[in-house]
Image (cartoon, helix red, strand yellow):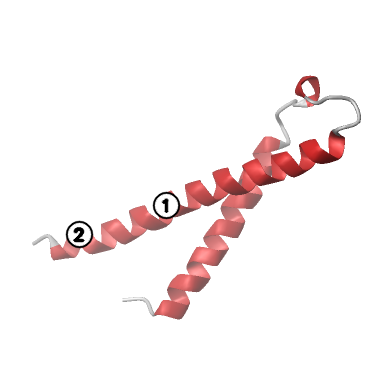
Amino acid sequence: MLSIGQVALMSILSHIIFIFITWRLMQTINFDPLIRKGRGTEAKILMLFITIVIGTGISRFFLEFLQWSQDLIYLL
């Protein structure tokens, strides 16, 4: 069983890794046709927020899946 500190560290690292991966994937999408002229800064901030939401969601899914798989021993 992992201690609270180890779980916290694993969660932080997981969130950072998945946010980074999502950011890299978001860079491959061409958003230029959707951005109004003169609104580049706002578009980058919006992209950052979207990246955080998606990356955190994916990270939570994997962390919960890992926890559920560890809880399966209590089924029997």
Q: Is mark 1 on a helix, strand or loop?
A: helix
Left or right of residue 23, residue 12 in this image: left
Residue 67, above or below 1: above
The residue under the point 49% across, 64% down is 11
- Residue that mark 2 sits on: 72
Q: Is mark 2 on a helix, strand or loop?
A: helix
Q: Which amino acid does label 2 sit on?
A: Leu
The image's mark for residue 62 is 1
**Residue lying furthest top:** 33
Quadrant of the image occupied by residue 32: top right
Q: In which quarter of the image is the N terminus?
A: bottom left
The image's mark for residue 16 is none
Q: In which quarter of the image is the C terminus?
A: bottom left
> Upstream in the sequence, badge 1 or badge 2?
1
Graded by Cα atoms within 10 Å as few (under 14), some (14 to 19) or many (20 or more), the crowding at tag 2 reads few
Left or right of residue 28, residue 17 in this image: left
The residue under the point 71% across, 32% down is 28
Residue 46, above or below 16: above
The residues bearing labels 1 and 2 have C-alpha atoms spaced at a distance of 15 Å
The residue under the point 62% across, 49% down is 52
Left or right of residue 74, residue 60 in this image: right
Q: What residue type is labelled 1?
A: Phe
**Nearer-the-camera pick, 49 or 1:** 49
The residue under the point 49% across, 47% down is 58
Left or right of residue 42, residue 54 in this image: left
Q: Where in the figure is residue 14, as x and y percent of width and height?
A: 53, 59
Quadrant of the image occupied by residue 40: top right
Q: Where in the figure is residue 63, as x and y percent of width and height?
A: 41, 57
